[in-house]
Image (cartoon, grey):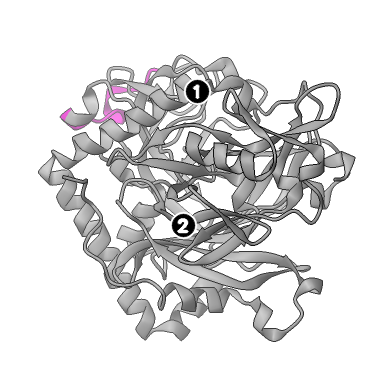
């Protein structure tokens, strides 16, 4: 293992040092409670079904007008470039530049496929707007709520009479208000409501981001508002009912230990095309979402060098806003044992000899296995002796809206694949993966794929299923 892969013991990622297990569990439980509460609201359920119906209609229309839609995607240039917040040799988060307000002011936000909350916010000085600029909010938005969509530049005019609570990723909560103004996302200009923190969460002041750009589903929100992508879908502004992600690996593109690195992309209504030097490997699969709350799918197992590790099956939530990978304790114990290591206080500790450049840990979906690069697996040395590693896979017993344990697959996994999140594939929400490989390692035409072929996989590999907007009885 190259020495550059391993960080100093003092350089634990912000995600690990700031978020305690208790805080992570508390935040996730809030999302679960939001989902259960939303299902008790007939109007919300109806809106969600209309959203999925709209996605199915768009999928059907797209199948009939592929050429026109391809031209439309090219003309719109709906691929948004992201920045990799590379900190202490770790890809910490991936950020999008988003404009807010009139006049437009640009902020960096974390692209997050799980949450729809504010991650942190700058200290804000709230301006007192003229009464006519601050319209009344619906009664459901006037109460205190736990989650909002995205934050805003401090100079925007707001409505101080309508407070809400904002869930953050640092200390927990910050007080805020709900406002409405112009948001520019790539080629799209939207008028939408979003949250502004009036009391900042300062736990993450070293982060360049001011909040979250949500690509999770609105089903776990408490404002009842669609996410920006859902708003684009409902307004017929995108040609396909999905978005896709390509995330860079900082160690591949810089010799520096930190910086904001270019190259990552999110494509709205299209599939990302990898940059020169990378191709989409022959391994591709699309799997249906189990319940339309998180981007949650069935994970068959973890593997080690092509062999299945027993007792590692679970559900998995795909989360671009999480740096590492978190798995149920039973899965973590099985992984540790397979590598000749042990589980200590939630961390997987293995001998340094267990992880070499040829070591391949993988995850299997739909009988197709996707592997991690070995440099993504190692987080740090476990102590000053440097005889063992802490892995970037840790134990955390998180439960979904049905009470099932699940693995949380963050950027440690996602930078090894192109991932596509669809609101309708054969009529149901689904997630697809295509393995990223170095172009020089693709030995035959069958070992490479294009964005078009991934789009084809999206339309052929998922069976039609009942609506997943339900919870277990």
Q: Which of 262 and 103 is in front in this view?
A: 262
Q: Is mark 1 on a helix, strand or loop?
A: helix
The answer to whether residue 127 shows anywhere in this view is no
Residue 370 position, x and y percent, is 60, 61
Disc 1 crowd, CA 10 A, few/some/many (<14, 14-19, 20+): some
* Depicted 296 relative to depicted 462: above or below: above
* Depicted 113 relative to depicted 21: above or below: below
Residue drawn at x 41%, y 46% as measured from the top left:
216
Residue drawn at x 46%, y 14% as measured from the top left:
199
Residue range in magenta is 128-139
Indicate the quadrant containing the C terminus: top left, top right, bottom left or bottom right: top left
The residue tagged 1 is 21
Q: Give the Cα separation between the discs numbered 1 and 2.
A: 25 Å
Residue drawn at x 44%, y 52% as measured from the top left:
189
The residue tagged 2 is 300
Q: Which of 143 and 243 is in front in this view?
A: 243
User: Is 245 covered by the magenta stretch?
Assistant: no
């Amino acid at each position: 293992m190259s020495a550059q892969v391993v960080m100093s013991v003092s350089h634990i990622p912000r995600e690990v040092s700031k978020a305690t297990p208790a805080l992570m569990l508390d935040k996730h439980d809030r999302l679960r409670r939001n989902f259960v509460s939303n299902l008790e609201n007939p109007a919300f359920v109806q809106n969600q079904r209309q959203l999925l119906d709209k996605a199915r209609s768009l999928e059907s229309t797209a199948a009939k007008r592929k050429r026109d839609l391809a031209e439309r995607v090219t003309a719109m240039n709906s691929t948004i470039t992201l920045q990799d917040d590379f900190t202490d040799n770790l890809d910490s988060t991936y950020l999008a530049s988003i404009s807010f307000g009139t006049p437009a002011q640009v902020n960096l936000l974390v692209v997050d496929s799980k949450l729809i909350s504010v991650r942190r916010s700058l200290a804000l000085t709230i301006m007192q707007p003229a009464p006519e600029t601050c319209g009344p909010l619906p009664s459901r938005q006037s109460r205190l709520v736990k989650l909002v969509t995205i934050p805003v530049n401090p100079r925007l005019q707001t409505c101080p009479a309508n407070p809400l609570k904002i869930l953050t990723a640092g200390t927990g909560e910050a007080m805020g208000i709900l406002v409405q103004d112009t948001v520019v996302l790539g080629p799209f200009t939207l008028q939408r409501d979003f949250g502004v923190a009036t009391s900042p969460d300062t736990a993450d002041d070293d982060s360049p981001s001011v909040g979250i750009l949500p690509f999770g589903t609105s089903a776990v929100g408490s404002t009842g508002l669609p996410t920006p992508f859902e708003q684009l879908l409902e307004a017929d502004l995108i040609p396909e009912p999905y978005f896709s992600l390509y995330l860079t690996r900082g160690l591949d593109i810089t010799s520096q230990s930190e910086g904001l690195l270019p190259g990552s992309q999110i494509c709205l209504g299209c599939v990302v095309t990898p940059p020169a030097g990378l191709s989409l490997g022959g391994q591709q699969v699309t799997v249906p979402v189990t319940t339309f709350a998180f981007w949650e799918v069935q994970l068959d197992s973890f593997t080690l060098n092509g062999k299945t590790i027993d007792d590692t099956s679970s559900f998995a939530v795909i989360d671009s806003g999480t740096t590492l990978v978190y798995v149920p304790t039973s899965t973590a114990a099985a992984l540790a044992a397979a590598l000749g290591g042990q589980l200590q206080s939630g961390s997987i500790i293995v001998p340094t000899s267990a992880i070499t450049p040829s070591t391949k840990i993988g995850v299997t979906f739909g009988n197709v296995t996707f592997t991690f690069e070995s440099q993504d697996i190692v987080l740090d040395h476990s102590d000053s002796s440097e005889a063992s590693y802490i892995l970037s896979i840790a134990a955390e017993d998180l439960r979904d809206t049905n009470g099932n344990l699940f693995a949380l697959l963050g950027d440690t996994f996602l930078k090894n694949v192109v991932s596509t999140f669809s609101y309708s594939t054969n009529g149901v929400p689904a997630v697809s993966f295509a393995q990223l490989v170095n172009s020089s390692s693709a030995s035959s035409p069958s070992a490479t794929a294009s964005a078009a072929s991934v789009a084809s996989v999206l339309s052929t590999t998922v069976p039609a299923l009942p609506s997943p907007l339900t919870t277990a009885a």
